[in-house]
Image (cartoon, rainbow, N blue to C red):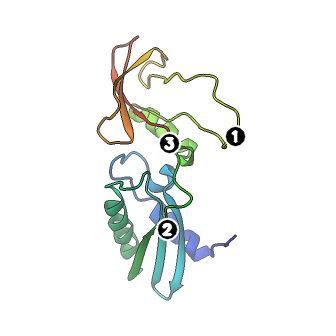
């Protein structure tokens, strides 16, 4: 296991504070896509970033936003590398990120747990507006490929559900 220096932790904190371009209510740290920062030399840093899925169109924007944030903090050379393994999972979303999604009106993904671990007893998706689990799928895809469009039967409000991966 590689231990980060205090400077690398600070660089990671700056990069992690960048908002997700598709879900600006979340930071990249809360989304769980930031894998770390590595100091390569004076004024030169490498940021590891894992896309939510292969071919995610937001990865380019995330990379340029990270570069801009670190340039603004005086780092002249920033490279963002895409790391595909281990693959990102919705389990990587922090508890704070899940809370923010719900507050924003998006049903957060259900925790998947470790492979071979216990299976969730319910497949219900809770409405972020009224809390009812009586919801229906309207479309497998919503404003982004990682979200589905659902409607609450109880309050009749449509909402996005961040799909489990």
Per the model, the C-alpha gap separating discs 1 and 2 is 28 Å
Q: Is residue 58 above or below residue 106?
A: below
Q: Earlier in the sequence, mark 1 or mark 3?
A: 1
Residue under pointer 3: 165
Q: Quadrant of the N terminus?
A: bottom right
Residue 52: in sight, yes or no? yes
Q: Report the disc number at residue 144.
A: none
Q: Residue 48: which disc?
A: 2
Q: Is residue 162 above or below residue 76?
A: above
Residue position marked by numbered label 1 in the rendering: 116
Residue 73 in view in this figure? no
Q: Nearer the viewer, mark 3 or mark 2?
A: 3
**Residue 101 versus residue 94 in the image, above or below:** above
**Which mark lies nearer to you, 1 or 2?**
1
Q: Position of residue 160 (x, y in %)?
A: 37, 31
Q: Which numbered mark, 1 or 3, is in the foreground of this view?
A: 1
Which residue shows up at 32% across the image and 35% down it?
141
Return the disc, 1 or 2, that comes first in the chain's sequence.
2
Residue at left offset 66%, top offset 43%: 115
Under tag 3, what secondary structure?
Answer: loop
**In the current view of this chain or complex, which residue is farthest to the bottom?**
42
Q: Position of residue 132 (x, y in %)?
A: 48, 16
Q: Residues within 10 Å of mark 2 (few under 14, many from 20)?
A: some
Q: Specify whether 109 is left or right of 80.
A: right
Alpha-carbon distance for marks 1 and 3? Answer: 15 Å
User: Answer yes or no: do the residues labelled 3 and 2 have beta carbons within 8 Å?
Assistant: no
Q: Residue furthest top?
A: 154
In the image: residue 158, left or right of residue 116: left
Q: x, y percentage for residue 102?
A: 46, 33
Q: Residue at x 39, y 66 (%)?
A: 66
Q: Secondary structure at mark 2?
A: strand
Residue 64 drawn at (x, y percent): 33, 67
């Amino acid at each position: 296991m590689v231990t980060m220096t205090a400077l690398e932790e600070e660089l990671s904190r700056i990069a992690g504070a960048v908002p997700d371009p598709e879900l600006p209510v979340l930071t990249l740290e809360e989304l769980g896509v930031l894998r770390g920062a590595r100091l390569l030399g004076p004024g030169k840093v490498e940021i590891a970033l894992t896309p939510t899925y292969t071919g995610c169109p937001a990865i380019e924007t995330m990379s340029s936003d990270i570069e801009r944030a670190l340039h603004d903090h005086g780092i002249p050379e920033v490279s963002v590398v895409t790391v595909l393994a281990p693959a990102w999972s919705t389990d990587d979303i922090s508890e704070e990120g899940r809370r923010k999604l719900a507050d924003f009106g998006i049903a957060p993904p259900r925790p998947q747990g470790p492979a071979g671990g216990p299976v969730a007893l319910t497949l219900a998706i809770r409405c972020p507006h009224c809390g009812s689990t009586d919801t229906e799928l309207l479309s497998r895809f919503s404003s982004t490929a990682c979200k589905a469009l659902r409607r609450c039967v109880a309050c009749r409000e449509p909402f996005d559900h961040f799909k489990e991966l």
